[in-house]
Image (cartoon, rainbow, N blue to C red):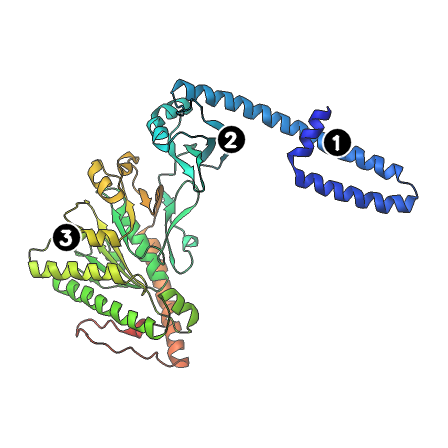
Amino acid sequence: MLKVIFKGFLYNKTIMWVLTVTAIIFNLLFGWAMDSWVPPLFLTLLFGGIICFVLGIFFSIKEMSNRKKYEKYQEIFNDINLISASGDLPYYLGADENEYLKLLTFQSLIPIENWEKKKPYLERYFNARILKICNTKDNNNIVNVYIVKKELPEMVEWDDDNILIEDYLSLGIDFTDIVYIDLNKYPHTFIAGETGAGKSVLIKCLIYQCLIKGYDVRLIDFKRGVSFAIFDKFVEIYSDYEKVIIVLENLVNETNDRLDFLRENKVENIKEYNQLSNRHMNRIIVFIDELAELIRTGDKEANKRIIGALETISRLSRAVGIHLFLGMQRVDSTIVNGQIKNNVSLRICGRFADPEPSRILLGNNLATDLPNVKGRMILKDGESKEFQAFYITTSTMNLALITSRKKEQKEDIQIKEETEPIPKPNKTKESKKLDFNFDDIL
């Protein structure tokens, strides 16, 4: 019994110290009031003993449960020969779980590569899919095994509550939370997936969020805008090479002008400028659906100008709020050159039956392991995570965009009446067809 009470005392030292301090105060007050220390001291010891006894029983039951789990996992690791060079088996430390995942934590000197090799055997023993096996960030001797309790839903309908603060764009949900893009951290993104993977729906959802947030959107689609007809009331859809070249080269000029503007104002990026200034510099988001059609023009001069503009934008526009979203149906090393690939660090990939596109884009075969579910994708932002993209309907977007546009028009009229226009920076190059100046900085 004393052993159980002692365990209870050690189980949560914070609680016991609080009880101890409370007991001292209790004794001082009531002992002084009753002119005797015996009753309050007795009651304090009795109360403290009961608390310690209850905690001790709880701790003993937990310890017994952990011991059984430890022995179970030891047996599994021994059966599949997951043993360190020194002959030690992984030591079970504990577990945690949410609606979708169960996390098992082990102390182990066995390299992650060896754990990965044994992954099929572990899945058989656990009778469940293992999402990933990895070390903790600050300790390579701690191994986390994420076991799927419940698969992600095959459809997650969009709700405007998923619109995040200004610099973030929502993608969908993974096994723990909402998945999003931070435009300050990842200015450019590849989005790839074969037919039926849900790439176009995801791009629509991103365009919708950008328009609702008031970003300046450029949409380039050589399928004549068929997939994005919902947006033709709100943005111009470019499907002609000559116009696209003008758009991209004007964006290069805009990038250089904005860099000069930020330097003159002694700030490092658009986020810092918008935080310090009462004038707002708007982000420009460029969506290119089916990059291959844009790159593979028969005109060598046009191809050179397009690739040159994309290289410059992807390299220089990080700080100035000009972002590229490059959609591809088929990932091919001949489509994207090394410079663009290196500058576009965020990758989103739908399912591919062929492992080659997955290896080119993600550096692994994870896209081939995805279930055949529309909208199920991999996001690679250092580590790879599986998520289910939001599904958004045309009617939802149309109603919200029309409402938002009417509200913006009213606000624009009020702003024009109350404020003076923002001075424009000097422009070195301008197009007669498209004027990319600073009129959009509100």
| Contact? badges 3 and 1 (CB < 8 Å) | no
Amino acid at the residue labelled 3: Glu
Q: Which residue is mark 2?
A: 93
Residue 238: x and y in percent read 18, 61
Amino acid at the residue labelled 2: Leu
For the point 26% across and 67% down, the residue is 255
Q: Is residue 204 above or below residue 100?
A: below
| Contact? badges 3 and 2 (CB < 8 Å) | no
For the point 46% across and 33% down, the residue is 102
Q: Residues within 10 Å of mark 3 (few under 14, many from 20)?
A: some
Residue 105 in the figure: left or right of residue 422: right
Q: Measure the C-alpha gap from mark 3 to mark 1.
A: 75 Å
| Quarter occupied by the C terminus | bottom left
Residue 21: x and y in percent read 75, 44
Q: Secondary structure at mark 3?
A: helix
Residue 126: x and y in percent read 42, 25
Q: Which mark is residue 320?
A: none
Q: Which residue is mark 1?
A: 50
Q: Is residue 442 above or below residue 111?
A: below
Choose mark 3 or mark 2, whichever is in front: 2
Amino acid at the residue labelled 1: Ile
Q: State whether residue 153 appears in this view.
A: yes
Q: Residues within 10 Å of mark 1 (few under 14, many from 20)?
A: some
Q: Is residue 243 above or below residue 119?
A: below
For the point 66% across and 38% down, the residue is 13
Q: State whether residue 218 appears in this view.
A: no
Q: Which residue is mark 3?
A: 293
Q: Quadrant of residue 141?
A: top left
Q: Quadrant of residue 280?
A: bottom left
Q: Residues within 10 Å of mark 2 (few under 14, many from 20)?
A: some
Say which of 297 and 46 sits in front. Answer: 46
